[in-house]
Image: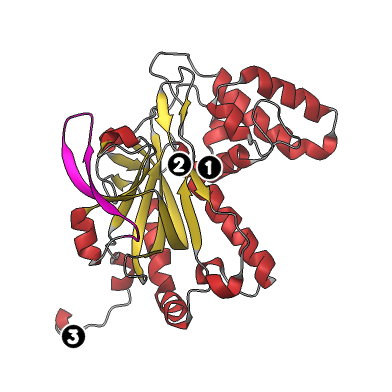
């Protein structure tokens, strides 16, 4: 029998769909015309593959530190339907299975995006690096929680849309030199009926779910970087030396620690401050004070654990000039 006549089940495991991508850009000064904030940039050629562009997006020129330029559709908000995520450590252009010193984190969310015609387009890969990784991960987690609450656990989060937008830019890192723009989930009243994506898209998601799972699992193996990314030169952060193994054992665990909210209103950081806010500011004294406060209140053991992880990551850095936060 010829190979052409064989119907192999293995082929599905070796074949991965190629999706267009959108990359998050932290610093609006890299754009022409200049933007006051960072945002979501989809290269024009990627939009051509998608045969549309995100709703509200306009054409900008994105310039990297090397002087290289590329045309992108840029917007500071996206309405998306989150499907699944994957994460990898990247160093020297290679995707690694686990953290090594000097590696940088890269998170991708597979999602449908509302396009300029008001339709759901995709799937697309939303690529985020740096602090935006924990922001996006936290937003998806919040979305899943509110869907679970609103539907009483009767429907998956991928049946419902979520709106994400940029927050107020800030300077982070020990030297306060890196300009970053947070990703924020719109936390308006959630109505599952109005957020439902409709039967047609829900059916398609169900039919293609195994394909999405294979996409996510593809990063479990090492390989070359470069998927879903315009350039590695736009990274605003590098990973500090001495990052504790406990903090990087799994990226998602560290993200969850950083997204833990303070159990009280902070005069310095506001009513909804998180461990990540203290970590981004390099505020060692505030983290120490928080740990001491929690030690007197055993019910806040989870907050203490998160604060200890952030404190350990900060204190084990070498304090070098180029050193910034890890994610």
Residue 54, position as x, y percentages in the image: 33, 60
- Residue in the foreground of this view, choosing between 324 and 244: 324
Q: Residues within 10 Å of mark 1 (few under 14, many from 20)?
A: few
Magenta span includes 59: yes
Q: Which residue is mark 1?
A: 250
Task: Examine the structure image and report whether residue 42 is included in the region drawn in magenta.
Answer: no
Residue placed at 33% from the left, 77% from the top? Answer: 9
Q: Which span of residues is magenta-colored? A: 54-72
Asked which quadrant contains residue 323, the reply is top left
Residue annotated with mark 2: 132
Q: Residue at x 17, y 39 (%)?
A: 69
How far across and down, in percent of the image, does residue 249 sit?
Answer: 54, 38
Residue wearing tag 3: 5
Quadrant of the frame with the N terminus? bottom left
Judged from the image, the secondary structure of the residue bearing numbered disc 1 is loop
Which of discs 1 and 3 lies nearer the camera? The answer is 1
């Amino acid at each position: 029998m010829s190979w052409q006549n064989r119907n192999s089940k293995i082929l599905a495991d070796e074949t991965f769909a190629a999706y267009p991508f959108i990359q998050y850009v932290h610093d609006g000064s890299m754009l022409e015309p200049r933007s006051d904030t960072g945002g979501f940039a989809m290269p024009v050629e990627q939009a051509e593959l998608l045969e549309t562009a995100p709703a509200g997006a306009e054409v900008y020129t994105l310039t990297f530190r090397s002087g290289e330029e590329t045309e992108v559709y840029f917007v500071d908000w996206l309405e998306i339907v989150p499907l699944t995520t994957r994460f990898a450590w990247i160093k020297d252009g290679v995707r690694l299975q686990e953290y090594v010193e000097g590696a940088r984190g890269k998170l991708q969310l597979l999602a449908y995006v509302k396009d300029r015609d008001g339709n759901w387009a995709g799937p697309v890969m939303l690529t985020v690096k740096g602090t935006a990784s924990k922001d996006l991960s936290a937003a998806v987690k919040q979305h899943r929680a509110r869907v679970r609450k609103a539907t009483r656990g009767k429907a998956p989060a991928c049946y419902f849309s979520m709106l994400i937008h940029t927050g107020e830019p800030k300077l982070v890192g020990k030297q306060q030199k890196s300009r970053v723009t947070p990703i924020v989930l719109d936390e308006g009243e959630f109505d599952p009926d109005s957020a439902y994506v409709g039967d047609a898209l829900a059916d398609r998601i169900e039919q293609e779910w195994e394909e999405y799972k294979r996409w996510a699992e593809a990063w479990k193996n090492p390989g070359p970087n470069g998927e879903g990314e315009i350039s590695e030169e736009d990274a605003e952060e590098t990973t500090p030396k001495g990052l504790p193994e406990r903090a990087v054992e799994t990226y998602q665990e560290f993200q969850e620690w950083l997204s833990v909210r303070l159990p009280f209103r902070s005069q310095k950081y506001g009513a909804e401050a998180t461990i990540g806010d203290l970590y981004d500011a390099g505020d060692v004294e505030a983290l120490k004070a928080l740990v001491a406060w929690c030690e007197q209140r055993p019910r806040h053991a989870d907050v203490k654990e998160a604060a200890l992880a952030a404190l350990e990551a900060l204190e084990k850095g070498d304090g070098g000039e180029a050193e910034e936060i890890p994610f």
